[in-house]
Image (cartoon, grey):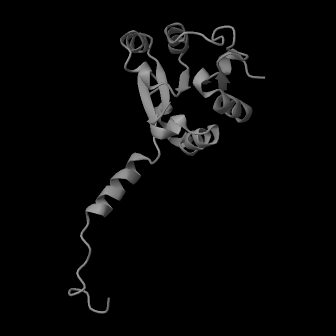
Amino acid sequence: MLQLDDVTYVVDENLLRVGAALVAVRKDTARFGRTPVGDMLPPGILDTDWIPIVGERGWVVITNDKHLRTRPVEAELAIAHKLKAIHLHGKVGKQSAWAQLTRIVTRWPAIEHHREKAPEGPWWLWVRRRPPWRRRARKRMSEMRRPSTRLMPGW
């Protein structure tokens, strides 16, 4: 059973089904309202109450709440308490739990790398559909001109 000292990641209430799946397969992940963090992070806890707890403990929150960065009070708390957050970016936030879980799991190596590279908060990591290097490569390919058949005989 997961002990409080072993928690690295906590999954916000807005991703309960994803949280259940991650807790089932990872030994360092907990979710709001469940053991071992349930007493500190009970169901229905306000963002302004959980941000200091998660930030001070050095945990990384996995969330679907994009407003944590834009609501002034929550943003100030996140900065003051050095919150580290992973956010599902784009339409996947409104898709099925399976789509959300797939997004997180396929990006997990990048998530771990970022956490190791930047152990101190505050930071906000978007989990996007395609990694940045794929987006750039795709853009470069789309900008390339098609070869002229006059210059390449036999095409």
Q: Which of 55 and 71 is in front in this view?
A: 71
| Residue 36, placed above or below residue 85 | above
| Residue 61, placed above or below residue 116 | above
Q: Which residue is drawn at 69% across and 13% down?
A: 38
Question: Does the rendering let one see residue 12?
Answer: no
On-image quarter of the C terminus: bottom left
Q: Residue at x 25, y 77 (%)?
A: 147
Q: Which residue is drawn at 31% across and 56% down?
A: 139
Residue 5: quarter of image:
top right
| Residue 89, placed above or below residue 75 | below
Where's residue 100, x and y in %?
A: 58, 39
Question: Does the rendering let one see residue 137?
Answer: yes
On-image quarter of the N terminus: top right
Where's residue 115, x and y in %?
A: 49, 30
Where's residue 31, x and y in %?
A: 65, 22
Q: Nearer the viewer, residue 28 or 146?
A: 146
Where's residue 37, x and y in %?
A: 67, 14
| Residue 104, placed above or below residue 63 | below
Q: Residue at x 47, y 22 (%)?
A: 84
